[in-house]
Amino acid sequence: MPRKANGRGKVRAELEGVLATLADLEECVPYVQLRISQAIRRTGMSDLLVPALDELKRVTKDVADARTQVLSAVDRLME
């Protein structure tokens, strides 16, 4: 049976879990952006969907920033 991580190992495991979640978001977002763009072209609902696409771009930047911060924390933890 594997041992439970403790101390630094536990923190590192938690940070790696966060990184996996952020990677999942980064993988999914381009597909959502594509779907929104297709909906704009197909329905002409740009007044509703363009702001949603803009918000998604902001969220994408926030996720990238969070990923950078978590990677920095992992690096500091491993020093």
Image: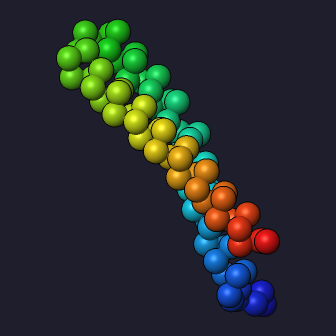
Identified at 21% across, 22% down, the residue is: 48
> Is 48 rendered above or below residue 61?
above
- At a point 68% along the width and 87% down the height, the residue shown is 7
Residue 37 on image: x %, y %: 40, 18
| Residue at 59% from the left image edge and 51% from the top image edge | 67
Question: Which is nearer the eye, 56 or 36?
Answer: 56
Left or right placement of residue 3 versus residue 19 in this view: right
35 is higher (above) or lower (below) than 60: above
Indicate the quadrant where residue 40 lies. top left
Relative horizontal placement of residue 25, taking residue 58 as reference (left or right) = right
Count of all numbered marks drawn on residues in the image = 0
Q: Is residue 77 shown above or below 22?
A: below
In this view, 62 is above or below 17: above
In the rendered image, residue 78, in percent from the top left (x then y), is placed at 77, 71
Between 76 and 42, which is closer to the camera in this rendering?
Answer: 76
Res 58 → quadrant: top left
Instruction: Identify which residue, 13 or 74, lies in the foreground.
Output: 74
Pick the quarter of the image with the C terminus. bottom right
- The figure's colour scheme reads rainbow
Q: Position of residue 9 (x, y in %)?
A: 72, 80
Q: Is residue 52 left or right of residue 69?
A: left
Quadrant in the picture for the N terminus: bottom right
